């Protein structure tokens, strides 16, 4: 079995891609996390996506080893690190580019995501229903280099300290057993 066959990819949107990227980079079994865009029309860039006019969402593409961390575990982290009940919004970030969305890569990923959302709603994990979209991945467009590893390179920046740091701390507390 070649190393590529041992990898799986998840493409997830849940607000600013810098937040999700920083968290998933600490998850055991994750090989690579790339910030980018998906779900809209045309070839996106940061300015266009930020305007909300392209239909693209800010997403992360997470490449991981499923024998170390399963797709279900990736989604458990994902649903813990953002609010999947707010339509087109994460905190102060408002617009369709910040929507909660899972771009699935296989029928199995689609079924798993649907099952997890159903379970979250049945168990009333959140006070409101989950509004996360589940849609097939058509294209992933990698964001410019300055968006990659943003938190690692800008930890003292205001946004990182105010928004990303609390998410990192939440991840480290809740998923201590799954940290690299």
Image (cartoon, rainbow, N blue to C red):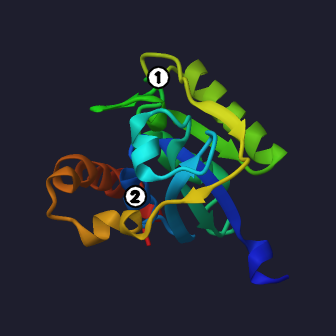
> In the displayed structure, does residue 106 sit left or right of residue 172?
right
Say if 144 sits above or below 5 in the image: above
Circle 2 — which element?
A: helix
Q: Quadrant of residue 117?
A: top right
The front one of 84 and 28 is: 84
The front one of 91 and 76 is: 91
Q: Residues within 10 Å of mark 1 (few under 14, many from 20)?
A: some
The residue wearing badge 1 is 87
Q: Residue at x 30, y 63 (%)?
A: 151
The label shown at residue 23 is 2
> In the displayed structure, does residue 121 sit left or right of residue 3?
left
Say if 42 sits above or below 155 in the image: above
* Distance from Cα at disc 2 to Cα at disc 1: 22 Å
Q: Residue at x 14, y 64 (%)?
A: 156
Q: Say which label, 2 or 1, has the lower sequence index.
A: 2
Q: Quadrant of the C terminus?
A: bottom left
Q: How many marks?
A: 2
> In the displayed structure, does residue 48 sit left or right of residue 9?
left
Q: Quadrant of the N terminus?
A: bottom right
């Amino acid at each position: 079995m070649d190393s590529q066959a041992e990898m799986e990819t998840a493409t997830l949107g849940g607000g600013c891609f810098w937040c999700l990227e920083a968290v998933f980079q600490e998850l055991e079994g994750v090989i690579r996390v790339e910030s980018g865009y998906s779900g809209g029309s045309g070839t996106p860039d940061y300015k266009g996506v930020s305007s909300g006019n392209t239909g693209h969402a800010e997403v992360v593409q997470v490449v991981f080893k499923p024998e170390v961390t399963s797709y279900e575990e990736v989604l458990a982290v994902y649903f813990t690190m953002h609010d999947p009940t707010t339509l087109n919004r994460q905190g102060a970030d408002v617009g369709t580019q910040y929507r909660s969305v899972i771009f699935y890569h296989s029928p199995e990923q689609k079924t798993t995501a649907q099952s997890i959302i159903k379970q979250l709603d049945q168990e009333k994990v959140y006070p409101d229903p989950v509004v996360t979209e589940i849609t097939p991945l058509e294209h992933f467009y990698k964001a410019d280099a300055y968006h990659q590893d943003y938190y690692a390179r800008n930890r003292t920046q205001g946004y990182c300290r105010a928004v990303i740091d609390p998410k990192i701390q939440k991840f480290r507390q809740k998923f201590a057993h799954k940290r690299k």
